[in-house]
Amino acid sequence: MEITLAQLLESRDERQLRQIQLTHRFPGRQLICLTVVLPGPVKRDARSLKVAEAGVEAIRSAFTPVFEELHDLETGFEGYFIVEGTLLEVKKACCHIENTHPFGRLMDLDVLEPVGEGVMPVSRDRVGEAPRRCLVCDRPARECMRAHTHPFDEIVQTIDKIIGFDANP
């Protein structure tokens, strides 16, 4: 099912509110928020669910969550995990998953830091990691996103290849 920009923006606002609630509920512990990188108006399909399932499994293998909450939404999968460890240790471990898991480039593992009354994702550069790479050409992802370097179909084909999804069985 295709979602609208309004639905996407509302889901981001709700996700940020939930992140704030969880960081206040579990002070001294770290919050990981798992979402799936899936461009386009469809955020929930067989591809996204396969990546989400792999992401949940990877987080559970790397950490022993003291709390987790999973949401399978039309606007995209969201997983919230409260774990032990320092902020930067947890971010480093999440970057390792993103960098080494076969589906890691399709997972967004944000580690959230309380800032004032809100939260901010810990940047990759704070733990010595390079910015995320483009799915198609391996240049910095932000450059390709801003410039619309790759056609949507090429991005979808790359995602299908990464997860072993055959659109034409």
Image (cartoon, rainbow, N blue to C red):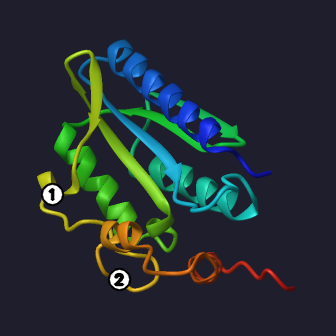
Q: Residue at x 22, y 50 (%)?
A: 123
Q: Badge 1 local density, few (<14 within 10 Å), some, or many (20+)?
A: few
Q: Residue at x 44, y 73 (%)?
A: 148
Q: Position of residue 49 (x, y in %)?
A: 69, 56
Most extreme residue toward the right is 169
The residue pinned by badge 2 equals 138
Q: Position of residue 135 (x, y in %)?
A: 45, 77
| Vertical order, 143 against 21 (above or below) | below
Q: What amino acid is found at the position of numbered circle 1 in the picture?
A: Asp
| Vertical order, 53 against 140 (above or below) | above
Q: Residue at x 61, y 36 (%)?
A: 6
Q: Nearer the viewer, residue 96 or 18?
A: 18
> Residue 92, which numbered label?
none
Q: Position of residue 96 (x, y in %)?
A: 31, 63
Q: On the image, which quarter does residue 22 sit in?
A: top left
Q: Nearer the viewer, residue 67 or 145?
A: 145
> Residue 125, which numbered label?
1
Q: Nearer the viewer, residue 133 or 87?
A: 133
Q: Badge 2 local density, few (<14 within 10 Å), some, or many (20+)?
A: few
Q: Is residue 57 left or right of residue 129?
A: right
